[in-house]
Image (cartoon, rainbow, N blue to C red):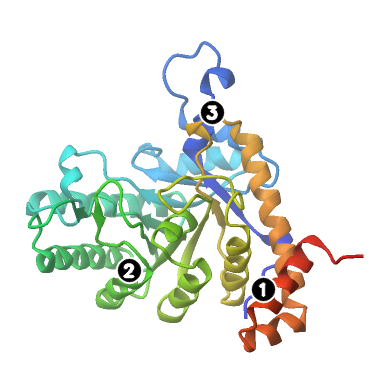
Amino acid sequence: MGRIALSQTRFATRLNSFASGAHLAWPGQPGKPSVIQMAARAARVNGLTDLDLNYPDHVNDNPAEMSRRLGDLGLQINGFAMRYYTNPDFKLGAFTHPEKAVRREAIDLTKKGIDAAREAGSKLMTIWLGQDGFDYAFQADYTAMWQHEIDGIREVCLHDPDCLISIEYKPNEPRSYSLMPDAATTLLAIKEVGAKNLGVTLDLAHVLYADEQPAFAAALIARHSRILGVHLNDGYAKRDDGLMVGAVHTLQTVELLRQIRRDGYDGAIYFDTFPDLTGLDPVRECEVNIKTVQRMLKVVDRLEQDNRLSSAIDRQDAVSTQAIVQELMFGADH
């Protein structure tokens, strides 16, 4: 069982969150803030250790220099995340586009992203294949589309076996149906690909609206593959709301943290939240997320030290488990 000390927990966040309220942070500046401007704002967050960078959006021609400048701000790069927006044709698919040349462009772009991540000193590339899917009945040859996906994932994994490749699954958006919609389907793909450096990024909001119990999904992934990334946020299980951690599904989040700790996850906790959608203060929002997770991890410690809980779980005694968890979270009655 892996146990990471609370003081050693790394916290990463979505860089684009720090464009929230840009007119207040950079009054009079035309256009969007630069990567370094957003990073400098993120560096004000107490407890933040890492950033994830989107490729190619956030990365210039000198990834090593970019990493050094972030280091000067006191931040490390947790990993890169691929974005397939450079070619409008990717809207019909990246690894699954019907034209071989477009598929080749997407695969080659991913390889360049992996190379850039390595130059920046990171060994994690997250691939969210939201464009790979379909919208209509009779639109797709499902067998051929699945094979293209498997072939593309395998090729990018083989490009640099020392770089971890993590699939972030999501039920839909932008496509009506995603080829990687849930944990089980993603694990089937990972089994077919057969690459040792391949794993899963578990995003809480995606898991919720895939109608999955987060800790159960995490346990399945740990059993059949491995979790390479954890994206915390929250939502109402209808879409990717990107709300603050614990805002809706507090118990499920605590159970997830308990599960990944038991399974030995030692990577960063990444906040994939959207303060920019409603103009929240991203520095304060991120600080509250960090404090929330730190409190939740303390609850996990108490849960793990309480023999009553493990005994009740062994009996599948839901009444007792709820009473124990509520007591350890909110205190006993006096």
Q: Of 124 and 25, which appears nearest the observer?
A: 25
**Above or below, comparing residue 131 to residue 207 in the picture:** above
Q: Residues within 10 Å of mark 1 (few under 14, many from 20)?
A: some
Q: Residue at x 58, y 73 (%)?
A: 259
Please state if 5 lies on the left or on the right of 275 as rendered: right
* Element carrying mark 2: helix
Kind of residue sitting beneath label 2: Thr
Q: Which mark is residue 3?
A: 1
Q: Which mark is residue 186?
A: 2
Q: CA distance from mark 2 to mark 3?
A: 34 Å
Rendering quarter of residue 264: bottom right
Kind of residue sitting beneath label 1: Arg
* Residue 333, x across and y down, in percent: 87, 65
Q: Residues within 10 Å of mark 2 (few under 14, many from 20)?
A: many
**Residue beneath label 3, please?**
279
Please state if 72 lies on the left or on the right of 305 as rendered: left
Q: Which mark is residue 298?
A: none
